[in-house]
Each structure stands twice: as C-alpha cells, then as structure tokens.
Image (spheres, rainbow, N blue to C red):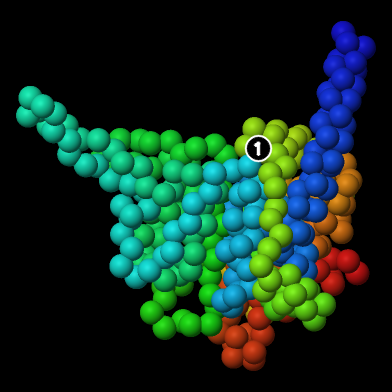
C-alpha cells in the first residue's frame, strides 16, 4: 500500500514537472510578445501578468498616458481572452456594467423580460479610472469580482471563465473622484504602480509608435491554456520556510504583533487575504522566472504590490510624510536581516 502511494506521488510530481515545463515555454513567449508592444515597464508587465496567472484582479495606478490601456488590450490578445473596456464616469449606473432586463413583446402581444448582458460579461475587463464612478457602481463591479456572477432582477447570471478585472486609477486628479473603500481594495490581488518609463524605453516609444506601422502582438495561448497554468500554479509546492516568511511578513505589518515601527505608524494592517495573495503570486513569479518552486526572494519582491493597498497609516505617520511603501520597505529589510 505504502509503495503504491509513493508511485502515485511520484507520478503526480512528474505530471506537475511536465506541465510546468510546458507553462515555462508559454510564459517565455507571452513575455516576448508583450515586449513587442510595451517598451520597458518590465516590473509593471510582470506584476500585471502575475495577477492574471494567479487567477486574480489587479489595480493599476499611474498618471495618464503610460500605456495602461494598451497593456490590458495587449494582454487580451496575447492570452487569447475576449476583452472589453468600460470608461468609468460619475454618471455610470450599475446596469451600464452588469446589464439589464428589457421587455419583449411577441406577435400575440405576450410580454416577457429578457436579460441583456452588460460589458462585464467578458474574460478580461478593463475598468478605466474606476475611482471616477459612484460608490454604488463601484460596489456592483467589485461584488461581481468577488462572486463571479451578477444578480439582476433576482436572477443569477454567471460570468465567463476565466474572469479578470484590470482596473486603472489616476492618482492625480482627486476632484470629482470617489476613492475605493479599503474593504473593496482588498478584492484586488495586487496594486501595480505604473511609473514613467526609463530614458531608453521612452526613446523607443518615440521611434516605434509615431511611424506608419506599429508592432502588433499575436496570440500565444487561449483561455483553456491560461486556466491550465492557473491550476498548475495552485499545485506548485511551497516550502515551510517560504510559508513562514509569508506569515511573518504579513503579521509584522499588523499593529499589536510586537513590531514597534508598525505599532507606531500603522493604523490597521493586512488581513489573511494578503497571505493568500502572496502564496499564489510567489508561485506565479517563480514560474515567470523559469523556476519550479518559490523562494523567500519572491515574497520580498511581492511585498509592496500585495500589501500596500491593504494597510493604512496613522494620522501622525502621514503628518510626518511617511508612506505605506516606506513602512513595507522597512519590514522587508527587517525580514531579510
């Protein structure tokens, strides 16, 4: 009996290794295709792709004109997902996203209701400037992100699989915006900060995007292959050491856990969902880098995008000009030390 079990485990490991090698090849081609269209921004591309490969949603924060929309449409093409985009505005209603019931009348005069699906019924949804919409509309989207179905007129309608939301937020113009509540920010696996490109990348943007022909990315995988990679990521082994590093990091970011700097500067810290996100994203990052198991370095590299939108500073810390990023950087240094 014991021998049989060992063989089964070995077969399982062999199957995982074979699937991982196939996925490594696919991810390498995906990276190459995205790089044809998005110049520089390696960290942004990596973190956004990791969120999708982990089966989650990402919030992209950056000033206008940094190719956030282009990145999302490129990912739709490369990953073989049908994509749609919603431009969020203050007058956008929940039904504009979810869909609505319309009344039909047949030849005999009989009336019936029919559900017309909204743009949320897609596999990759770009929610542009999500903080411009009213809280009611935001919560309609965020509920769908959590539950993977929408309810209209009491009827449940399941969303397509896989379903990913890549939302963008402009940090500059705060007038006329409704910041996302903390509990709703937690729905995003990662917050990806999109900065200005490096000089060499900006030079390439100037030269490559102002001519007659622009490079186009091609499809590499389809939705079924993406789901297979997502399933594989959940099966990748994680060592005790890495699990301990995740727990230690997440717990050190919460006040009342013996970390003096956190107690002084953090009003409230990340919940258990942060640990789950780190666990998934670390596996995805290992695969993205061509490795079959995550390391403590993966955890430290992902600390900022996974934790920063799940924490808030005290008023005193904000008054001193401190940011959540500073606090996370301090925790990472301490964890490495």
> Could you say which is closer to the camera, residue 129 or residue 326?
129
- Residue 148 in the image: x percent, y percent? 48, 41
Pick the front one: 221 or 326? 221
Position of residue 204 relative to residue 287, above or below, is below
Q: Residue at x 38, y 36 (%)?
A: 157
- Residue that numbered label 1 is attached to: 222
Q: Is residue 285 above or below residue 131?
A: above
The location of residue 214, given as percent across then percent down, is 68, 63
How many residues crowd mark 1 within 10 Å: few (<14), some (14–19), many (20+)? Answer: some
Q: Position of residue 96 (x, y in %)?
A: 33, 55
Residue 312 seen in the figure: yes
Looking at the rendering, which quadrant does residue 251 occupy?
A: bottom right
Looking at the image, which residue is at 64% across and 61% down?
A: 71
Q: Residue furthest top?
A: 1
Asked whether residue 188 appears in the rendered view, the answer is no
| Residue drawn at (80%, 57%) of the image | 299
Q: Residue at x 87, y 59 (%)?
A: 297
The residue furthest left is 109
The quadrant of the image that shows the C terminus is bottom right
Figure check: 223 above or below 70: above
Q: Residue furthest bottom?
A: 320
Relative to 96, say whether 318 is above or below.
Answer: below
Q: Is residue 273 left or right of residue 92?
A: right
Q: Name the image quarter holding the N terminus.
A: top right
Q: Position of residue 99 (x, y in %)?
A: 33, 47
């Amino acid at each position: 009996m014991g021998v049989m079990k060992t063989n089964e485990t070995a077969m399982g490991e062999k199957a995982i290794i074979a699937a991982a090698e196939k996925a490594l090849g696919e991810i390498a081609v995906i990276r190459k295709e995205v790089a044809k269209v998005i110049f520089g921004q390696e960290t942004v591309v990596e973190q956004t792709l990791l969120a999708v490969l982990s089966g989650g949603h990402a919030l992209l924060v950056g000033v206008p004109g940094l190719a956030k929309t282009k990145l999302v449409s490129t990912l739709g093409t490369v990953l073989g997902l049908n994509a749609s985009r919603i431009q969020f505005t203050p007058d956008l209603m929940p039904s504009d996203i979810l869909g609505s019931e319309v009344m039909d009348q047949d030849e005999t005069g009989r009336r019936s209701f029919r559900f017309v699906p909204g743009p949320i019924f897609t596999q990759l949804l770009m929610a542009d400037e999500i903080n411009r919409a009213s809280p009611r509309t935001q919560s309609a989207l965020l509920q769908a992100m959590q539950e993977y179905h929408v309810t209209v007129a009491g009827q449940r309608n399941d969303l397509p699989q896989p379903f990913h939301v890549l939302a963008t937020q402009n940090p500059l113009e705060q007038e006329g915006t409704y910041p996302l509540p903390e509990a709703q920010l937690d729905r995003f696996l990662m917050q990806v900060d999109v900065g200005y490109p490096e000089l060499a990348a900006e030079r390439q943007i100037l030269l490559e995007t102002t001519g007659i022909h622009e490079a186009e990315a091609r499809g590499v995988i389809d939705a079924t292959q993406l789901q297979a990679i997502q399933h594989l990521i959940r099966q990748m082994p994680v060592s005790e050491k890495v699990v301990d590093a995740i727990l230690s990091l997440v717990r050190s970011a919460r006040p009342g856990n013996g970390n003096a700097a956190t107690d002084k500067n953090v009003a409230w810290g990340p919940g258990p969902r942060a640990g789950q996100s780190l666990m998934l994203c670390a596996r995805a990052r290992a695969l993205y880098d061509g490795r079959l198991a995550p390391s403590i370095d993966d955890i430290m590299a992902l600390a900022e995008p996974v934790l920063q939108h799940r924490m808030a500073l005290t008023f005193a810390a904000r008054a001193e000009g401190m940011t959540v990023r500073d606090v996370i950087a301090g925790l990472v240094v301490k964890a490495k030390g």
